[in-house]
Image (tube, grey):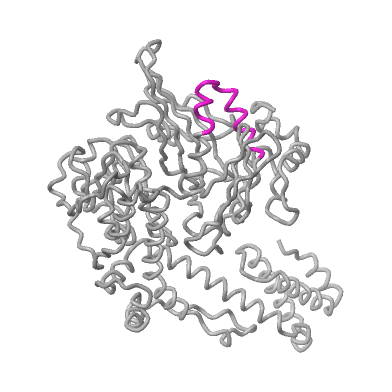
Amino acid sequence: MSLRERSPSGAGEAGENAAAEAAAASPAEPDGPGRCLSLLPWDRFSAWLHCVCVVGFDLELGQAVEVIYPLHSKLTDKEKTNICYLSFPDSNSGCLGDTQFCFRFRRSTGRKVSFCCFLDQLDRDLPVYLKKDPAYYYGYVYFRQVRDKSLKRGYFQKSLVLISKLPYVHLFRTMLKQIAPEYFEKSEAFLEAVCSDVDRWPPPIPGKILHLPIMGIIMKLRIPTYRDKPGTTPIVQNMHQADAQISMALPTVHEVDLFRCFCPVFFHIQMLWELVLLGEPLVVMAPSPSESSETVLALVSCISPLKYCSDFRPYFTIHDSEFKEYTTRTQAPPSVILGVTNPFFAKTLQHWPHIIRIGDIKLPGEVPKQVKVKKLKNLKTLDSKPGVYTSYKPYLNKDEEIVKQLQKGVQQKRPTEAQSVILRRYFLELTESFIIPLERYVASLMPLQKCISPWKSPPQLRQFSQDDFMKTLEKAGPQLTSGLKGDWIGLYRHFLKSPNFDGWFRSRQKEMTQKLEALHLEALCNENLVFWSQKHTEVETVDLVLKLKNKLLQADREHLPVKTDTLKKLQMHINDIILALPDDLQDILLKTGTT
């Protein structure tokens, strides 16, 4: 079925048949999220991608969006402009051949989100660092530039771009590698077929092994869940199929090659970890969008399982709609990580406190030499030597062991995948050593269970006190899990003022408040509510019924961590109380639905 046939104009006529068709296209569990998938044509596609764009070069207009699929996909003019400029490397990059990279840009405000309740349901099961940010889109680019004498400019220049809310860098990079070269040969009909394939994919359910067919190949993968132990990735085995389809097992959906990205600056990885943790303004100056985007994504991921809560732009250009906002000198640089390639930025961002300059990312054939942190005043142009330019003094003493371990790996020609595993484990242990004391202190702000009374509102969390937290560090600080010395107290003080702390604490606060609401519900269920109602007036009993119905609504709306049995028990309590009331009140309360 072509895209034109399946556009919204036909959705009304297709009605239930289209929904049934979508349901049959891929098996879904009867009780799982898959059962609500068949709402409209293209809902399955929308669960993975917003749209697919083709950006070409017009001699009169410059970069222009030539095609958007599916045809009914909506992009504002501002979004199209951002996509146009971000989908091509800067002219100075000299990217001949095929180049892959990604970018991130702000969504226009006020647009409607379809299918959101279902996607929110899936989002809840993700680790915090993989949750969607509703304010941003990712663009995954496959750019081709080859000589072509038949064209006026002498070059064929075109980008195939996947626009998605999902941060699944490795998945979409792999997908583009499969489809883009063929698209440049076959053109639009091929894109229609690609989009139809994606519209048959199962939903992006965390924790399940998913099989995603794309143009004769099946990608097999697993999206992590928040229940996974940090640092572990369940291995997805290759399939041995009897049919002709080729399968490809993806070891990750979102991770980048950490060691390759940090190789040019790996003597400073610990300092970079601190800068990212503290939400400091950072610029990555690179020779191409491929290097800039991979390095920015590596930086953001180095504090995992903490979520980086500020803005980050894997590839940023002078045409970006936030260019003025982020480069102004009238105020301090914002908490953001920018990846840039245009030499103009060497001058424009001179006032930024931390700049990482990287050359072409190549894995070293020999042990890299120790490189000192450079002074910012020495950064004149984008041609300056690779390195880290900052006056920042790290709070923690340098961990020489990790540097030696990685150097030894280079000497022994250890595979880059193995080096990345070592580096990822190092960052994870460092982040966990830092965050565990905070987790422990915040857990102590939770009221005791005995303080929860069914007849009173749930108790409030105690206030976070910086002084009280600092006092806990003497006996229960990071020294329990990390051998690193240094000014941990100073690092915590700085972190508590950062956007990353604010985002982390808000998330923990929400979780604990929901836990208190859930415990309050359980306390209500364990009471003999019918007996209580018999000893109180009808007005008080009706008030109780309405409050209990609101509690059930809240549990459903906020997805409180309550067992299904508890909710059923509460509903039974409500029914029993209503049946004990006079008939006229029963009629009114039974008609008062729970919606």
Tell which of 507 and 205 is nearer to you.
205
- Residue drawn 30% across the image and 61% down it: 274
- In the depicted structure, whether residue 334 falls above or below residue 13: below
Question: Which residue is the extreme one toward the left?
Answer: 377
x, y percent for residue 233: 52, 57
Residue 328 found in image quarter: top left
Q: For the N terminus, give its image quadrant.
A: top right
- Residue 244 magenta-highlighted: no
Give the magenta range. Answer: 178-200
Relative horizontal placement of residue 208, taking residue 445 as reference (left or right)? right
x, y percent for residue 119: 60, 51
Relative horizontal placement of residue 32, taking residue 52 as reference (left or right)? right
- Magenta segment, prevailing SS (helix, strand or loop): helix
- Residue drawn 73% across the image and 53% down it: 29
Q: For the C terminus, give its image quadrant.
A: bottom right
- Residue drawn 35% across the image and 32% down it: 89
User: How many numbered tags mark residues here?
Assistant: 0
- In the depicted structure, whether residue 499 falls above or below residue 433: above
Tell which of 539 and 210 is nearer to you.
210
x, y percent for residue 405: 32, 59
Tell which of 543 and 131 is nearer to you.
131
- In the depicted structure, whether residue 341 falls above or below residue 367: above
x, y percent for residue 410: 31, 50
Question: Which residue is the extreme one toward the top?
Answer: 150
Question: Which residue is the extreme one toward the front?
Answer: 412
- Residue drawn 66% across the image and 81% down it: 523
Residue 538 found in image quarter: bottom right
